[in-house]
Image (tube, rainbow, N blue to C red):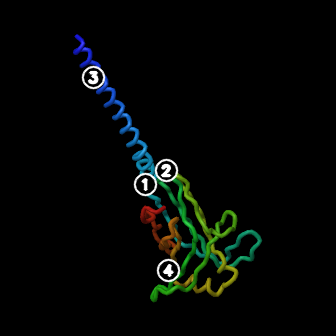
């Protein structure tokens, strides 16, 4: 009987030790893999954008500005991710249609407040819609603005959060909108 009790006690101790070891291994795996899986899950999904066509207006004005030649376009972005992201250093670059050389570069402004669109934030799992308009070129260099209107090609140039530069073609007036995801996994 004593040996049976001893064997039972031994089985209980071995079972308890295995249970404790299993719990420790489970906790370590959860602590180690949990945050990695959570971060990966938060970063899954794409940041999709849609650019409207570039519309030129000979009498564009904001607030008390004198009307002059300028452009407007919409950028609509849906961030599918569980984390917010954004773009920075937003510029519009006008290229000669034949030579592909830059004619002018402009920092667009937000039509809502007239401030330069130096950055655009995209909250998690939400749409962001901005209407952008002509920036510095409109008033500082009207001759460059006229050349830009006749150039034939415009690009939205942005930097992603880790610094990579990305150029997005802005469709000409009447053309289909550009619809694509932003590249890579860095935003």
Q: Quadrant of residue 114?
A: bottom right
Q: Residues within 10 Å of mark 3 (few under 14, many from 20)?
A: few
Say how many tags the image has: 4
Q: What residue did someone put label 3 on?
A: 10
Query: Whole-Å distance between the Cαs marked 3 and 2?
Result: 50 Å
> Which numbered disc flags the more N-terminal residue, 4 or 2?
2
Q: Please tell me which residue lies in front, 33 or 58.
A: 33
Residue position for label 2: 82
Mark 4 or mark 1: which comes first in sequence?
A: 1
| Disc ID at residue 45 | 1
Q: Position of residue 130 (x, y in %)?
A: 59, 62
Residue reaching furthest to the right: 64
The reply to whether the C-beta atoms of the residues labelled 3 and 2 are less than 8 Å apart is: no
Q: Alpha carbon of mark 4 to alpha carbon of mark 1: how far?
A: 30 Å
For label 4, the residue is: 153
In the displayed structure, 13 sits above or below 155; it is: above
Badge nearest the viewer, 4 or 1: 1
Where is residue 116? Give x, y as percent.
Answer: 65, 70
Residue occupying image coordinates x 53% and y 58%? 85
Q: Front-most of 107 and 94?
A: 107
Whole-Å distance between the Cαs marked 4 and 2? 35 Å
Q: Earlier in the sequence, mark 3 or mark 4?
A: 3
Residue that appears at 49% across and 56% down:
79
Task: Determine the secondary structure under disc 2.
Answer: loop
């Amino acid at each position: 009987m004593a040996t049976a009790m001893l064997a039972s006690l031994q089985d209980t101790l071995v079972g308890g030790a295995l249970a404790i070891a299993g719990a420790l291994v489970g906790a370590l795996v959860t602590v180690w893999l949990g945050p990695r899986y959570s971060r990966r899950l938060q970063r899954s999904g794409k940041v999709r954008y849609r650019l409207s066509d570039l519309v030129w207006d000979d009498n564009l004005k904001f607030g008390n500005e004198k009307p002059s030649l300028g452009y407007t376009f919409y950028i609509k972005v849906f961030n599918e991710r569980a984390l917010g992201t954004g773009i920075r250093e937003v510029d519009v670059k006008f290229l000669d249609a034949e030579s592909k050389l830059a004619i002018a570069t402009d920092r667009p402004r937000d039509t809502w407040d007239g401030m330069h669109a130096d950055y655009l934030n995209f909250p998690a799992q939400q749409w962001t819609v901005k209407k952008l308009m002509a920036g510095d070129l409109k008033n500082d260099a009207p001759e460059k603005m006229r050349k830009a209107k006749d150039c034939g090609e415009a690009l939205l140039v942005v930097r992603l959060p880790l610094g990579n530069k990305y150029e997005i073609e802005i469709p000409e007036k009447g053309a289909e909108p550009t619809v694509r995801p932003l590249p890579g996994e860095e935003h």
